[in-house]
Amino acid sequence: MKRIILLLLITVQGFAQNFDYRNYTDLLSNHVSSKGNVNYDKLKTNVAELNLVVAEFEKTQPRKNWSRNEILAYYINSYNVHTLKKVIDNYPTKSIKNIRNAWDDKFIVLGSKNISLSYIEHNILRKMNEPRIHFAINCASFSCPDLLNKPFLPQTLNSQLESVTKDFINDGSKNVIEANEIKISEIFSWFSGDFKSKNTSLIDFINKYSTININEDAKVRYLDYNWSLNK
């Protein structure tokens, strides 16, 4: 009976059946603000806590019996925690772009092989046909989507992806949207194909989340990306 109650409590708290996100939850809540700002100085002093979470991701990887949402949540969270590690391992720094091979360094252990942040993004997440991942993964920079200060969880993944996508698109510091002209993040340029389909344009995608309706013939411009550290 006690075991059943414990399992029910874990489910209610939102922890994945195949991965325990409790330590990652604590790491984020202790070092990331509700606005997505990271206290890197504090995290540097608590590097053992960060390394513990990284080790948990290395110890448990997705298996064939995992659901799509469990796999998506795992790799989104893995990308974000390993980005934190990459910055902390090279901290202090003013920008992740100052770190040599930040995205291509194969420092992430996945089973019997080592992979990079780029591999997770391009070879795993983008191939799962879920464009909203671009607003969930964080590149430790001001112009990136905010780093959520709690894990993405399989049970709540769709609502979380909807929320972060809406928040990013309507954030005036990331995008400036008017009916006849939009000045938007370069994310929409770099990954334009991920947001469009045979019957859906980029503006159609943005209009699903924008509080301002954009005309289909609106001018589209891209804002310069600010790579300053999100602290």
Image: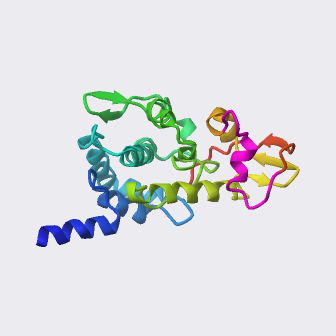
Task: Locate residue 179: give its quadrant.
Answer: bottom right
The location of residue 192, given as percent across then percent down, is: 67, 35
User: At 45% from the left edge and 47% from the top edge, which residue is drawn?
Assistant: 80
User: At 68% from the left edge and 40% from the top edge, which residue is drawn?
Assistant: 188
Magenta-drawn stretch, dominant element (helix, strand or loop)? loop
The location of residue 212, given as percent across then percent down, is: 78, 59
**Magenta span contains residue 99:** no
The location of residue 124, given as percent across then percent down, is: 44, 33
Query: Is residue 192 positioned above or below 212 on the image?
Result: above
The chosen color scheme is rainbow
User: At 33% from the left edge and 28% from the top edge, which residue is drawn?
Assistant: 114
The answer to whether residue 72 of the structure is visible from this angle is yes
**Magenta span contains residue 211:** yes
Range of magenta residues: 196-214
Question: For the view shown, which residue lies furthest in the front direction?
Answer: 199
Instruction: Locate residue 218 relative to residue 130 in the image: left or right.
Output: right
The location of residue 111, given as percent across then percent down, is: 26, 32
Work out whether residue 89 or residue 140 is closer to the camera in this orientation and state it: 140
User: At 25% from the left edge and 28% from the top edge, which residue is drawn?
Assistant: 112
Task: Locate residue 1: give its quadrant.
Answer: bottom left
